[in-house]
Amino acid sequence: MCNPRRVTIQLNRCIESAWRQTVEQVQSVSGSVSELARINTRVPLDEEMGDSALAMLERVLSGEFKEFEPWDRDQQGVFHRNLGDLTMMYDPATHQLSVETQLTETVTAEARAAVEASGFTVGEVAVEAVGTYFDDNWGGRDEGVALEEAQKSADHKLSKAIEELHLQQHASELEAARDQARTQAQILAEQQLAERQAATREALRDRLRVTLAQGAERASHIMNQAVGEAYRQTLISLVRQNGGRILTNEQTGSVINVELELY
């Protein structure tokens, strides 16, 4: 193997040409959709047994009687009972029972937009590429192969240098195009998000209506048990306050049997 030899190719190019490049941007947005369904009804205990029955209902919901699980109570005095997919709320101030259910879902949207940046480039670029070969053509590397490789390398470097010159001279145009594409993509994404949120909201409402309809009977049964116990305890309290006796005080399921003796 003889000493390697080198061939060098130098390319110079004067650039005076129009330039354009398409810039694409992608934007993603997300938002939550929350819907609430509620049924309100008044508990008219005071109309039949007076305020003492309402006060007794609060004692029942507070868990004062061992047969009944206590409800949670917030700082405003409203009782809460969590049924999983439903929440019951009783407000002693208004005598109102509310049954509600809520669903929340996150919605995402993605959009892309493309804007063209353009300008006129003026300048000069120069590149150099080297190829190697051997006098005895060792390894199949003769001068022709070296020249071909050097030419390919020089052409590649020249194309890259021209593109870099374009980018240097038109950096502001590129940045403006990116900003414009980003803004357009953001607008499109927000439009898509709004459409998806509207569709999701309708779907949530349908699901909530079904959940509320299925759970209303269960909630009514729970409240009726509490109201029945309030009736019973109020009646027992009134009898004892007036010197009477309780002869029978039994409950089987939802049936309450109380025998009283009044004097």
Image (cartoon, rainbow, N blue to C red):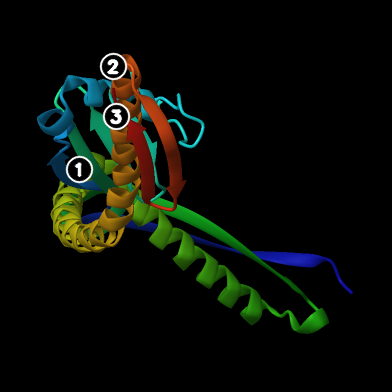
Q: Secondary structure at mark 3?
A: helix
Residue at image point 20% right, 63% down: 206
- Of labels 3 and 2, the one closer to you: 2
Q: Is residue 241 left or right of residue 66?
A: left
Three-letter code for the amino acid on which mark 3 is drawn:
Leu
Q: Residue furthest bottom?
A: 140
Identify the image quadrant of residue 203.
bottom left
Mark with earlier residue (3, 2): 3
Q: Residues within 10 Å of mark 1 (few under 14, many from 20)?
A: some
Residue at image point 24% right, 44% down: 99
Q: Position of residue 254 (x, y in %)?
A: 38, 51
Identify the image quadrant of residue 195.
bottom left
Q: Position of residue 63 (x, y in %)?
A: 45, 27
Q: CA distance from mark 3 to mark 1?
A: 76 Å
Q: Position of residue 103 (x, y in %)?
A: 30, 50
Q: Residue furthest left?
A: 47
Three-letter code for the amino acid on which mark 1 is drawn:
Asp
Query: Which residue is nearer to you in this view: 55 or 23?
Result: 55
Q: Quadrant of the N terminus?
A: bottom right
Three-letter code for the amino acid on which mark 2 is drawn:
Asn
Q: CA distance from mark 1 to mark 2?
A: 84 Å
User: Which residue carries the number 3 mark?
Assistant: 235
Mark with earlier residue (3, 1): 1
User: Which residue carries the number 1 mark?
Assistant: 179
- Of labels 3 and 1, the one closer to you: 3
Res. 1 mark: none
User: Which residue carries the number 2 mark?
Assistant: 242
Up-down relation of residue 48 to residue 77 (above or below): below
Q: Position of residue 79 (x, y in %)?
A: 32, 28
Up-down relation of residue 162 to residue 63 (above or below): below
Q: Secondary structure at mark 1?
A: helix
